[in-house]
Amino acid sequence: KSGISNLTGLQEGGGSVNIQGEEQKKLDVISNEVLKSALRYSGKMGIVASEEEDKPVLVDETWSGNYISVFDPLDGSSNI
């Protein structure tokens, strides 16, 4: 079993905001890292851009592809 006790609440105890000015929740940050890593290592993406990042992230040349991905990693997290 996997617990969620450390996955809920605000990132850094509050005060951490995304590019939209919304307070980031822990699940926002975790889902962003998981999705960003999966896309970066797919070999298809050259750039990944997330609502949780200030700027688009270039994919390392070793894994770089021809596509750009723009995403909100956990849409609706304010409902959690």
Image (cartoon, grey):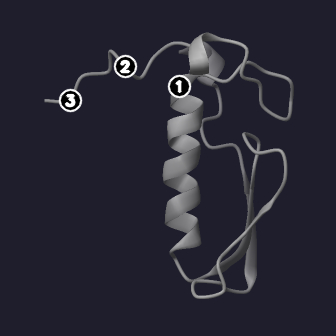
65 vs 4: above or below:
below
Q: Name the residue carrying label 2.
A: 6
**Disc 3, SS:** loop
Query: In screen coordinates, is 68 left or right of 5?
Result: right
Where, by quadrant of the figure, is residue 58 drawn? bottom right
Where, by quadrant of the figure, is residue 6 drawn? top left
Mark-to-mark CA distance, 1 and 2: 8 Å
Measuring from the top left, give residue 8's x and y in whole percent: 45, 16
Which amino acid is tagged 1? Lys
Which amino acid is tagged 2? Asn
4 vs 50: above or below:
above
Callout 2 touching callout 3 (CB < 8 Å): no
Residue at x 49%, y 64% (from the top left corner): 38
**Disc 1, SS:** helix
Residue at x 51%, y 29% (from the top left corner): 27
- Which label was assigned to residue 2? 3
Measuring from the top left, give residue 26's x and y in whole percent: 53, 25
- Which label was assigned to residue 62? none
Where, by quadrant of the figure, is residue 60 drawn? bottom right
Which amino acid is tagged 3? Ser
35 vs 12: above or below:
below
- Identify the mark nearer the N-term, 1 or 2: 2
Q: Name the residue carrying label 1.
A: 26
Residue at x 32%, y 21% (from the top left corner): 4
**Disc 2, SS:** loop
Q: How many marks?
A: 3
Q: Residues within 10 Å of mark 2 (few under 14, many from 20)?
A: few
Callout 1 touching callout 2 (CB < 8 Å): yes
Nearest to the eye among marks 2 and 3: give it.
2
